[in-house]
Amino acid sequence: MDKAGFSRSVHGKFSCVACHAGIVTFPHGKKPQKVNCGICHLPGRGGAPKIPALQYRLSVHGMAVREGVAGAPRCQTCHGSHYILPPNNPMSVIYRKNIPRLCSRCHRAEYGIYKKSIHARALFDMGIEKAAVCYDCHEEHRVPNVTSPRWMLWLVGKCGSCHKRELATYKQTYHGQVTRLGYTTVAKCPDCHGSHGILPPSELWHQAFWALSLRVCLSGTQMPHGPPGL
Ligand code: HEC
Ligand code: HEC
Ligand code: HEC
Ligand code: HEC
Ligand code: HEC
Ligand code: HEC
Ligand code: HEC
């Protein structure tokens, strides 16, 4: 273990047994008990933020761990053990730009599609830091089931927090007004734009599927973001 690296971490001021609570004798056995981050992060002991652990418990990840699903992430799977750095440190695994890499350790298929999207291009090629990464849409600790109607409605507002003009025009359309009432059956942002592989519409009109499905479904009604020129 690298002592210097540990002392630079967010937990550098703690003694070893603060986390390795099971160890009371010396010499201790070779394999220490699994560390339970919740001993500080659930009660919020000594200023430890507690919201992440509370949210995690209800997430698909937290529930999967409780159900014994192999490969579901615990706190230390994502954060590491001795060298945890805060999210604003570019060396941290939870630094914004490193999020797709973190999640893609397990979700390779989604990452494979995402990396070709306009969001990934904006982030990695154009240096636009605020482009959407995995946790913007899924939330790192809350991670709701993707079939949850509440999440789908929440996501409309989330897309709209970055795309304010499109949210405003969407709200004026039939789809937007019905969605605002809480119904999830009409078209919402990902139904037309997709999720991981979102591309600029200007690149999509050439693709038969997008052009056909949208032209057919929109003919006779308004454009999805209100009348042209709005
Ligand atoms: C912030 C909590 C935390 C602190 C403080 C901490 N550890 Fe750990 N340690 C972990 C975690 C997490 C693991 C990975 C295994 C696990 O998940 O329980 C681990 C694993 C270990 C292992 C097993 C081998 C390995 O690296 O995976 C050793 C040995 C160890 N720690 C020694 C120490 C020593 C010595 C100190 C004090 C200098 C220390 N730890 C402080 C959290 C901590
Ligand atoms: C002994 C109590 C304790 C344990 C056990 C503990 N933490 Fe912490 N943790 C803290 C405290 C206190 C802070 C706040 C440090 C600060 O703000 O300087 C913190 C901060 C953090 C931060 C950074 C917050 C930020 O915004 O900078 C992360 C991430 C974190 N802990 C994750 C973990 C993980 C993962 C584990 C288990 C491997 C763990 N902690 C175990 C007490 C603990
Ligand atoms: C699926 C991966 C993942 C898991 C599992 C996970 N975290 Fe996190 N955590 C993250 C990411 C990503 C961030 C950065 C969030 C941000 O920058 O807003 C983060 C941020 C944090 C922070 C800092 C929050 C802040 O506001 O500064 C703490 C503390 C933390 N996690 C603790 C935990 C604890 C405790 C657990 C287990 C109960 C846990 N995390 C499980 C990915 C994860
Ligand atoms: C260590 C592996 C691992 C990491 C890292 C990981 N996940 Fe997961 N994730 C899983 C597993 C396993 C499941 C499936 C749980 C189950 O079977 O119910 C899952 C489920 C999900 C789901 C729900 C899928 C559904 O069908 O509802 C989403 C969304 C998700 N993860 C997003 C993320 C995001 C975002 C990150 C990064 C912040 C991340 N995951 C990091 C292993 C991981
Ligand atoms: C712009 C929002 C957005 C971003 C960014 C995003 N997702 Fe998703 N994700 C969704 C939506 C919406 C769904 C629901 C199913 C669908 O439409 O594909 C979903 C579904 C999922 C699922 C469930 C299985 C599946 O494929 O349907 C997993 C796992 C997942 N995402 C992981 C990730 C990971 C990992 C990243 C980052 C590389 C990521 N997501 C980035 C919106 C997003
Ligand atoms: C019924 C399908 C549909 C829905 C629902 C929809 N869009 Fe669109 N969106 C389109 C089409 C078609 C275009 C291209 C023509 C246009 O700009 O009106 C577009 C264009 C865009 C553009 C690019 C604008 C530009 O300058 O080229 C963004 C960003 C966008 N939408 C975001 C959103 C967001 C955010 C939501 C949800 C609040 C949403 N869309 C809902 C179909 C849809
Ligand atoms: C955290 C901010 C953020 C979130 C959340 C987000 N986006 Fe984006 N989006 C961006 C940025 C930045 C770009 C690239 C710059 C640009 O063209 O506006 C972009 C580009 C786009 C484009 C192409 C725009 C164009 O000019 O052709 C579409 C379409 C789009 N996003 C749709 C969505 C949809 C749908 C969602 C939700 C499922 C979403 N975005 C969520 C930030 C975000």
Image (cartoon, helix red, strand yellow):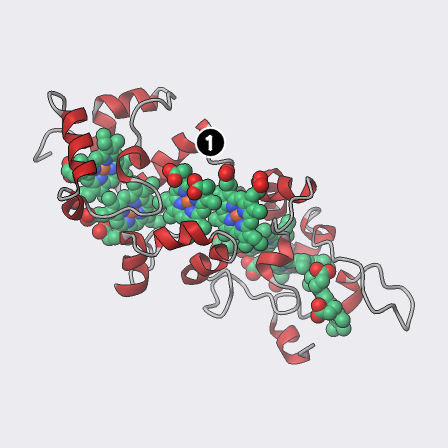
Does residue 167 appear in the picture of this structure?
no
For the N terminus, the quadrant is: bottom right
Does 61 sit above or below residue 75?
Answer: above
Of 209 and 5, the residue lying toward us: 209
Does 220 sit above or below residue 213?
Answer: above
Residue lying at 51% horizontally and 63% vertically, measured from the top left = 93
Of 44 and 137, the residue lying toward us: 137
For the C terminus, the quadrant is: top left
Residue lying at 23% horizontally and 21% vertically, measured from the top left = 174
What is the residue that sits farthest to the front in this orientation?
208
What crowding class fits label 1: few (fewer than 14 Cα within 10 Å), some (14-19), or many (20 or more)?
few
Residue lying at 48% horizontally and 67% vertically, measured from the top left = 89
- x, y percent for residue 97: 40, 62
Q: For residue 65, which quarter of the picture?
A: top right
What is the residue that sits farthest to the left in this orientation?
229
- x, y percent for residue 202: 14, 46
- x, y percent for residue 95: 46, 62
The residue under label 1 is 147
CB of mark 1 near ligand 4 (< 8 Å): yes
- x, y percent for residue 116: 30, 55
Q: Is residue 57 left or right of residue 99?
A: right
- Tag 1: residue type? Thr
Q: Secondary structure at mark 1?
A: loop
Q: Is residue 201 left or right of residue 182?
A: left
Q: Is residue 193 left or right of residue 56?
A: left
Q: Is residue 45 left or right of residue 51?
A: right
Q: For residue 115, which quarter of the picture?
A: bottom left
Does residue 179 appear in the picture of this structure?
yes
Q: For residue 66, which quarter of the picture?
A: top right
Does 62 sit above or below residue 29?
Answer: above
